[in-house]
Amino acid sequence: MQAKWHEPYLETCCRSALHRLTLVGGPGRPDGLKDGPCLERLQALGLARRRPADGRFEITAEGEARHAREILKKAG
Protein backbone atom coordinates (compact mmCIF):
# COMPACT_ATOMS: atom_id res chain seq x y z
CA MET A 1 0.00 0.00 0.00
CA GLN A 2 1.38 3.41 -0.98
CA ALA A 3 1.56 6.30 1.45
CA LYS A 4 -0.77 9.15 0.60
CA TRP A 5 0.28 12.78 0.54
CA HIS A 6 -1.83 14.73 3.04
CA GLU A 7 -0.27 18.17 2.71
CA PRO A 8 -1.01 20.77 0.04
CA TYR A 9 1.58 20.86 -2.72
CA LEU A 10 3.98 23.79 -2.58
CA GLU A 11 5.02 25.28 -5.89
CA THR A 12 8.75 25.79 -6.38
CA CYS A 13 8.39 29.52 -5.79
CA CYS A 14 6.58 28.95 -2.49
CA ARG A 15 9.19 26.40 -1.40
CA SER A 16 11.83 29.05 -2.09
CA ALA A 17 9.88 31.64 -0.11
CA LEU A 18 9.62 29.19 2.80
CA HIS A 19 13.38 28.66 2.65
CA ARG A 20 14.00 32.41 2.60
CA LEU A 21 11.92 32.72 5.77
CA THR A 22 14.30 30.33 7.51
CA LEU A 23 17.33 32.25 6.25
CA VAL A 24 16.11 35.68 7.33
CA GLY A 25 15.26 34.52 10.86
CA GLY A 26 14.13 37.10 13.41
CA PRO A 27 14.02 40.19 11.20
CA GLY A 28 11.32 38.58 9.02
CA ARG A 29 10.49 39.24 5.36
CA PRO A 30 8.85 42.54 4.48
CA ASP A 31 5.64 42.74 2.53
CA GLY A 32 5.75 44.03 -1.02
CA LEU A 33 8.54 41.82 -2.38
CA LYS A 34 8.24 39.59 -5.43
CA ASP A 35 7.53 36.58 -3.21
CA GLY A 36 4.56 38.34 -1.57
CA PRO A 37 1.93 36.05 -3.13
CA CYS A 38 3.86 33.01 -1.90
CA LEU A 39 4.16 34.48 1.59
CA GLU A 40 0.40 35.04 1.59
CA ARG A 41 -0.16 31.42 0.53
CA LEU A 42 2.25 30.17 3.20
CA GLN A 43 0.32 32.22 5.74
CA ALA A 44 -2.97 30.69 4.58
CA LEU A 45 -1.43 27.23 5.02
CA GLY A 46 -0.21 28.06 8.53
CA LEU A 47 3.44 27.86 7.53
CA ALA A 48 4.09 31.58 8.00
CA ARG A 49 2.49 34.48 9.84
CA ARG A 50 2.46 38.23 9.46
CA ARG A 51 3.54 40.04 12.59
CA PRO A 52 0.97 42.62 13.66
CA ALA A 53 3.61 45.05 14.95
CA ASP A 54 5.50 45.57 11.69
CA GLY A 55 3.68 43.54 9.01
CA ARG A 56 6.72 41.37 8.28
CA PHE A 57 6.38 37.65 7.65
CA GLU A 58 7.99 35.01 9.86
CA ILE A 59 8.01 31.23 9.78
CA THR A 60 5.79 29.25 12.15
CA ALA A 61 6.66 26.00 13.95
CA GLU A 62 4.61 24.17 11.30
CA GLY A 63 6.60 25.97 8.61
CA GLU A 64 9.88 24.95 10.21
CA ALA A 65 8.75 21.32 10.33
CA ARG A 66 7.63 21.39 6.69
CA HIS A 67 10.91 23.04 5.68
CA ALA A 68 12.89 20.32 7.47
CA ARG A 69 10.89 17.50 5.81
CA GLU A 70 10.47 18.87 2.33
CA ILE A 71 13.43 21.14 1.69
CA LEU A 72 16.14 19.79 3.96
CA LYS A 73 14.82 16.23 3.45
CA LYS A 74 15.02 15.36 7.16
CA ALA A 75 12.76 12.56 8.38
CA GLY A 76 10.15 13.48 10.88
Image (cartoon, rainbow, N blue to C red):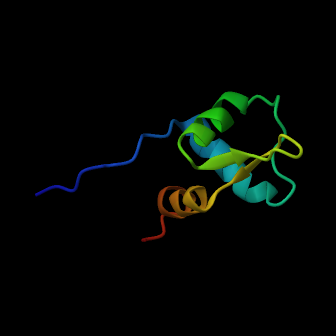
Quadrant that contains the N terminus: bottom left
Quadrant location of residue 36?
top right
Q: Count of labels shown? A: 0
Residue 44 location (% of width, % of height): 57, 38
The correct choice, above or below, for 21 with respect to 55 in the image is below
Side (left or right) of 65 relative to 9: right
> Would residue 4 appear left or right of 8 to someone viewing this image?
left
Q: Is residue 7 above or below residue 26?
A: above
Q: Is residue 73 above or below residue 47?
A: below
Give how far across and how far down residue 22 sits, in percent: 71, 58
The residue positioned 48% from the left and 62% from the top of the image is: 69
- Viewer-side residue, 9 vs 60: 60
> Would residue 8 appear left or right of 40 to someone viewing this image?
left
Residue reaching furthest to the left: 1
Image spot of residue 45 (x, y percent)? 53, 42
Q: Nearer the viewer, residue 71 or 63?
A: 63
Residue furthest to the front in view is 52
Q: Residue at x 64, y 44 (%)?
A: 16
Q: Is residue 69 left or right of residue 60?
A: left
